[in-house]
Each structure stands twice: as structure tokens, then as C-alpha cells.
Image (spheres, rainbow, N blue to C red):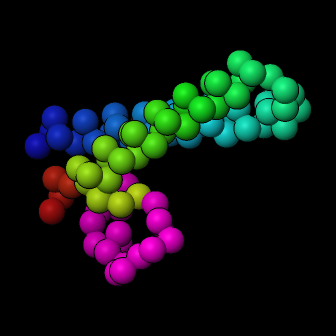
Amino acid sequence: MMNLALSRERLMRQIQIYSFAVYDALLYLDAYPDSKSALNFYNQSKRAEERAIAEYEARYGKIRLSGEEKSWQWTDGPWPWQNEEAK
């Protein structure tokens, strides 16, 4: 059970890293909108973020709203600060 929790935490950490990179690139592009390298970095980071989120959601359930919710099940699982071993 411990390895599963660690992989879940690592995957969430990857999402946080990619999300930060995406946001940082957006801020940079606000100041330098013609920067091709910044735009490439943004696109790469956004794709990596989307892949990591898709993997996390496939393994552990939703972490974002898609705008087409049929139910409100994302609250059924443990909250990020809850220890799964306590169940």
C-alpha cells in the first residue's frame, strides 16, 4: 500500500511542477508575446501537464472539473491531506 501512495504523491507532484511551468510561461508570454522559445516551452509544458492529469485521473479519480459533469463524485474519495492507510 505504501508504494501506491508514493506513486500517487509523485504523480501529484509532477502535476504541480507542470502547472507551475505552464503558469510561469504564460506570465513570460504576457511580457514577451513574440518569443518562439517561450511559446514552445509553454506548449510542451501544457502537453506534459495534460498527460500527467489524465494519468492521475485514470488511476485515482478526477482532480478537475471538465464542465460536463454528470455527477459530483470527485468528493467521494479521500482528500489530498487524508492518509489512505487510516481507512
How far across and how far down the image is residue 48, in percent? 46, 33
Q: Looking at the rendering, in which quadrant would you find the C terminus?
A: bottom left
Question: Looking at the image, is 3 positioned above or below residue 35?
Answer: below
Instruction: Give the side of residue 73 with respect to residue 34, left or right.
Output: left
Seen in the image, is 24 located left or right of residue 72?
A: right
Task: Pinpoint residue 41: horizontal percent, then vertical percent.
Answer: 63, 24
Please check the rendered image and state whether residue 69 is part of the magenta-colored stretch, yes or no.
yes
Say left or right for 23 vs 44: right
The quadrant in which residue 5 appears is: top left
Which residue is found at the position 80% from the left and 33% from the top? 29
Considering the whole magenta stretch, tell me its main secondary structure. loop
Q: Residue furthest bottom?
A: 71
User: Could you tell me if residue 83 is visible in this image?
Assistant: no
Q: Position of residue 20 (x, y in %)?
A: 60, 36
Q: Is 79 colored magenta in this rendering? A: yes
Query: Magenta segment, which residues?
Result: 64-83
Q: Residue furthest left?
A: 1
Quadrant position of residue 71: bottom left
Q: Residue at x 16, y 53 (%)?
A: 85
The number of callouts visible is 0
31 or 35: which is nearer to us? 35
- Name which quarter of the figure residue 46 lies in: top right
Q: Is residue 51 above or below residue 36?
A: below
The answer, for residue 43, to whether it is visible in the render is: yes
In the rendered image of this protein, does residue 85 appear above or below residue 37?
A: below
Residue shown at the point (78%, 37%) measured from the top left: 27
Residue nearest the viewer, comparing 17 with 25:
25
The residue lying toward the viewer, choosing from 19 and 37, is 37
> Most extreme residue toward the top, as rendered?
37
Instruction: Out of 7 and 23, give the one closest to the viewer.
Output: 23
Which quadrant of the rendered structure holds the N terminus?
top left
